[in-house]
Image (spheres, rainbow, N blue to C red):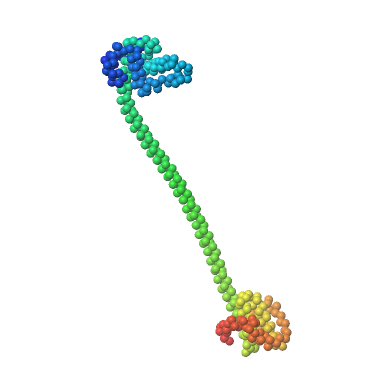
Amino acid sequence: MNFSFPLLKKDVILNCLIQIKIIDKNFDIDKMENNNFENLIEKTIEYYSGKSINSLIRSLFIIKTIKNPEYYELSIKFLSIFKNIKYLTTIAGFFSFTLYNYLDINLKTIHIILSGFINLAKFKEESKRYLKKFFRINDLLKMQIFLRFRNLLSLTNLSNFQISQKKKRLKCYKTIIYRTVTYKYIMNTKNRDLNILNKYKKRKINIKKDNLKIKKKNFSRINSFFSKICLYYPGKSEIKLIFMYFYIVSIYLNNNKLIIDNLKLLSIVIHKILDFSSISKLKHLDFSISNHHKKSFKFRIKPLNKEKILEEFKNKNSIFSKLYYLGIYSRFLSKNPN
């Protein structure tokens, strides 16, 4: 027989089997029968496998599917036990164990098998001590791996959170930059509009100044014309009223051309009121009008009753009376008492 383990003495075998609780103290190897050997083998198999012998015999369920299962139950159980013994003896180092050895069992074979099992049991117990140490180390390593994995997961979550915060800040920065640029554009536009508005205001002020100069100039021209009329016809209050009307109308309309046209009409009305027989005296007057306008003077003399024109001033619905009652004439007289 070929085996790779030392043979143990019977006392050592019995003590070891008693320690692992496979046999009791009254067990005698020399008086062992086949039935006792089978029970010993089954307990040994259960010790090494950690399972019951019935759970190891996986082929027993086949018996329920065939006819007359009582014929096959013992043989299937026998072959299953042999298979497990063969597996254990191979692990223990008894490589030449065969079915013939199991059928023709003897004390020598039992001594070899039990020595192999005891050596395997010792190896198992010694291995347990080392394995427990390695199991503890393994558990510690697993715990460290778990902690590192959890820390890595926390760092990953923190990194993702920081990335999201950076994206949000970047978005906020872009919004701030956009608003800043927009605000600068609006302020530039506002300043430009303010400059344009100031230019228009200055232009409006200049236009008002120019209009005031034109009004003063027109007033001086009309005043000169009025003074020359009064030199020829002093004490004529009707002329003052007519002059006042045309002066107010000219200023209200604020149009130089209309002022000149009103001067033309004024000369015609004055001529009609005073019933000039000729226009020779008017020709001596200087109207302060350009030569271009002087050439366009045309007097159409028609008879007109002076009393009718004076009635227009007395009529409350006429333009002369409305202007008079508004007080414009009084303000004019206060500035020009003569």
Q: Position of residue 298 (x, y in %)?
A: 71, 80
- Whether residue 230 sits left or right of residue 87 in the image: it is right
Q: Position of residue 332 (x, y in %)?
A: 58, 82
Is 196 placed above or below 66 here?
Answer: below
Residue 291 appears in the figure: no
Q: Position of residue 134 (x, y in %)?
A: 33, 28
Is 316 placed above or below 2 here?
Answer: below
Residue 268 appears in the figure: yes
- Tag count: 0
Q: Nearer the viewer, residue 332 or 110?
A: 110
- Residue at 64%, 81% in the rendered image: 319
- Residue at 58%, 71% in the rendered image: 207
Q: Position of residue 242 (x, y in %)?
A: 64, 84
Task: Identify the image quadrant of the N terminus.
Answer: top left
- Residue at 27%, 16% in the rendered image: 26
Q: Nearer the viewer, residue 120 or 181?
A: 120
Residue furthest to the bottom: 235
Q: Nearer the viewer, residue 275 or 103?
A: 103
Q: Nearer the viewer, residue 231 or 153?
A: 153
Quadrant in which residue 5 is drawn: top left
Quadrant in which residue 200 is drawn: bottom right
- Whether residue 329 sits left or right of residue 167 in the image: it is right
Quadrant in which residue 140 is drawn: top left
